[in-house]
Image: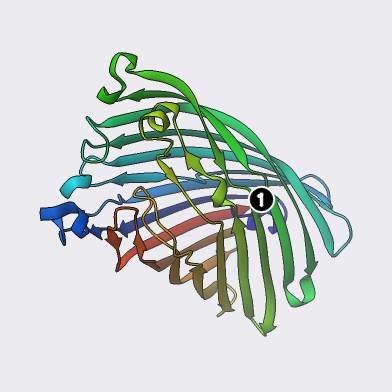
Amino acid sequence: MNFGILYEDGNYVELGYSRVTPTVSGTYSAAFGPFSGSSTGDLAGDYSAFSLGYKHQFTDRLALTLILNTPYGADAHYTAGPYTGLTAQWKSRQIAAVLKYDLTDNFSAHGGLKYLRSSAQIGIPNALFPGGYTAVGDTDERVGYIVGAAYEKPEIALRVALTYESGITHSFRTTETAPAFGPGNPIASTTDVEMPQSLLLDFQTGVARNTLLFGSLRWSEWSVWEVRPIGFEAASAGSNIADFDDDVFTWTLGVGRKLNETLSVFARVGYEKKNRGISSRLAPTDGYTSAGIGGSWTKDNLKIAGGIEYISVGDATDSSGVVFKANDAFGVGLSVGMQF
């Protein structure tokens, strides 16, 4: 979640849009016999995301911000070889209400609640599960919390903010279908999926006239996340469908330059640490590096910003020895904000 809107002046509203075009494919290992060396096909579909933020300044010190965004998502579907028919979809929508209070001219605190709504669906082909398997998780809604603090020194454009977001555990009403279940098919149950807690440190500071250095470091506890429906677990000797072995650390670093009273530009790089373990077939990537450029145009109370980014996706290997390498993604983003 982007908390930058908390620090906009006065009342402010912003609409954002992003579009990502990934390419993720792998090469089958010798374990797949005649398919050895052939491609899995591109499993990652293009996706778009919208966001909406609104900040209302009640007093000189107290403000309320509402943020609507899409925090999690997945749309994987294999199209070639033994993995054909292996699919995963995760849809989510989140709204957060965050109060910010200026304790002094330099220190502030913020906190509030977030409401997360998610649904999920998974399909596994006969080559990976006898007779095939599907699981549908109905929409589940949960509430978490946000708390943080910031230090600001406006005369040098300095701001350092630390924000914690609690984890949320979804309890999906799940319907599992598979011929292997026999007379018990389908199975209705509840599947708990724990979404990660996270800690975000972000900063900005002026380093020269009209020049800004900015960046962030985020820790997310993805090691707690797994999908383990009871029917699949029982039929596969205690296995889960998907999980992540490690937590994720992500950082960004960039520089912005004000060219004149209306136009500014920026460049930034990003990095997510590789964990070098066995990757899930439904998320066969391991870290990334990225580079992006963009700019903003400001006139009176209107601000329009946009950018493009290239992401080099980290190589990964799944439990069957399928290697995913030389994958990447392109992203574009646009936001329109207005003070009033």
Q: Position of residue 52 (x, y in %)?
A: 55, 45
Q: Position of residue 300 (x, y in %)?
A: 61, 62
Residue at 73% of width from left, 67% of height from top?
A: 160
Q: Quadrant of residue 315?
A: bottom left
Q: Residue furthest bottom?
A: 208
Residue at 34% of width from left, 55% of height from top?
A: 318
The vertical placement of 309 against 125, above or below, is below
Q: Quadrant of residue 247?
A: bottom right
Kindly tell me whether residue 300 is visible in this rendering.
no
Q: Position of residue 43 (x, y in %)?
A: 27, 51
Q: What is the three-letter code of the residue carrying label 1? A: Phe
Colour scheme in the image? rainbow
Residue 123 horizontal side relative to residue 170, left or right: left
Nearest the viewer among 333 and 241 is 241
Residue at 42% of width from left, 44% of height from top?
A: 242
Q: Residue furthest right?
A: 104
Residue 280 horizontal side relative to residue 201, left or right: left
Nearest the viewer among 252 and 50 is 252
Kindly tell me whether residue 53 is visible in this rendering.
yes
Packing grade of label 1 (10 A; few <14, some 14-19, many >=20) is: few
The vertical placement of 263 against 16, above or below, is below
Q: Secondary structure at mark 1?
A: loop
Q: Residue furthest left?
A: 34
Nearest the viewer among 181 and 218 is 181
Q: Position of residue 258 (x, y in %)?
A: 58, 78
Q: Which residue is mark 1?
A: 340
Q: Quadrant of residue 170?
A: top right
Residue 78 horizontal side relative to residue 189, left or right: left
Residue 110 horizontal side relative to residue 199, left or right: right
